[in-house]
Amino acid sequence: MKVVFAGTPEFAAVALRAIHAAGFEIPLVLTQPDRPAGRGLQLQPSAVKQYAVAHGIPVAQPLSLRMDAKDPQRALEAKQAHELLLGTDYDAMVVAAYGLILPRSTLDIRPCINIHGSLLPRWRGAAPIHRAIEAGDHETGVTIMQMEEGLDTGPMLLIERTPIGPQDTTATLHDRLAALGADMVVKVLRKMEHGVIEAVPQPEAGVTYAAKIAKEEAALDFSLPARDIGRKIRAFNPFPGAHAIVNGIVIKLWGAELLDADSTAPAGQVLAADAEHGIVVACGSGALRLTHLQKPGGKRLPAAEFIKGFSLDGLRFE
């Protein structure tokens, strides 16, 4: 099979590497345009583009695939991308975290399959890994599905599960699901080659939507139960980074442990900040032991190191 690949971040690059390593011919890669990144805001290619360029795979970076886009430049680039796809010899397109909507005109050219980081129909949408952790799900997984115009509504070709551990963050779960999805998509492509793949409609029950993460969500409310705050800290690691204000300073919180203890202290009150107990904070119910913190301009530090340069005695997180 000849496979066109569409994807942008590292999650997608893992799949691209696996497809390439499996021996599938990749005549074209689609990825988002280079974006400013780093302190100097220099244009940086996506992880997918970096792999494609390093291996001599042609790359296209249209702003849009919608030929009816209102912006003339986007419409022009979409038309050019459509003509490029029509002129490319391929059997299927694999899509993983591309970031652009595939219109009907693209879906109709060849079969399109998507690598989605959830157990569909749960967590359709942009941020399935974050939302699964935030909601306290005990398991997640990857679904390989046929694409259609609806948002992650297509029939399923393969689904595999993995547990969500009590210390899993979006970062750790992302890496596990990326590897799982890469392995799965190769299996699906092999089955497609031999015409033995079966598409199963998604269940109608259990649909949830994983809305894109907004930066303002990362501001923690310590009046919530400790369990919920701990989930948010793990869900927003590495992006956008959960934070709270203490003594007028925004502190990012990268890790926490749930404590089976209640306190009559106000929510957010620092109950302990020493080498013996660590950093313990009262919540709406229960308490959290903060394990990794970061002050503005500083490095992410274990709690024991953080309190050496930032006293929290008697303070309160707001």
Image (cartoon, rainbow, N blue to C red):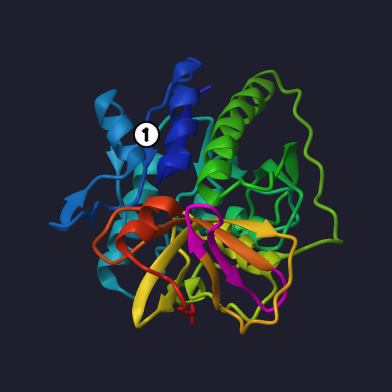
Q: Position of residue 42 (x, y in %)?
A: 14, 54
The residue identified by callout 1 is: 28
* Crowd band around label 1 with a 10 angstrom C-alpha radius: few (<14), some (14–19), many (20+): many
**Mark 1 residue element:** loop
Position above or below: 36 against 96: below
Q: Which residues are magenta?
A: 273-286
Q: Say above or below: 255 vs 86.
A: below
Q: Is residue 282 magenta?
A: yes
3 horizontally vs 250: left or right: right
Quadrant of residue 309 in the image? Answer: bottom left
Residue at position x 50%, y 46% from top?
171
In the figure, is residue 148 to the left or right of 3?
right
Q: Residue 118 or 227: which is nearer the viewer?
A: 227
Does residue 16 appear to the left or right of 183 in the view shown? Answer: left
Q: Quadrant of residue 190?
A: top right
The one of 232 and 14 positioned closer to us in this rendering = 232
Disc tally is 1
Residue at the image point whose x is 55% and y is 31% from the top: 179
User: Residue 233: horizontal and vertical position, in percent?
Assistant: 55, 61
Q: Is residue 126 visible?
A: no
Viewer can see residue 310? yes
Residue 238 percent location from the top left of the image: 45, 54
Tell which of 199 and 278 is nearer to you.
278
Q: Position of residue 157 (x, y in %)?
A: 73, 37
Nearer to the camera, 313 or 217: 313
Q: Is residue 50 magenta?
A: no
Residue type at mark 1 is Leu
42 versus 311 height, above or below: above
Which residue is at 45% across, 31% downward?
16
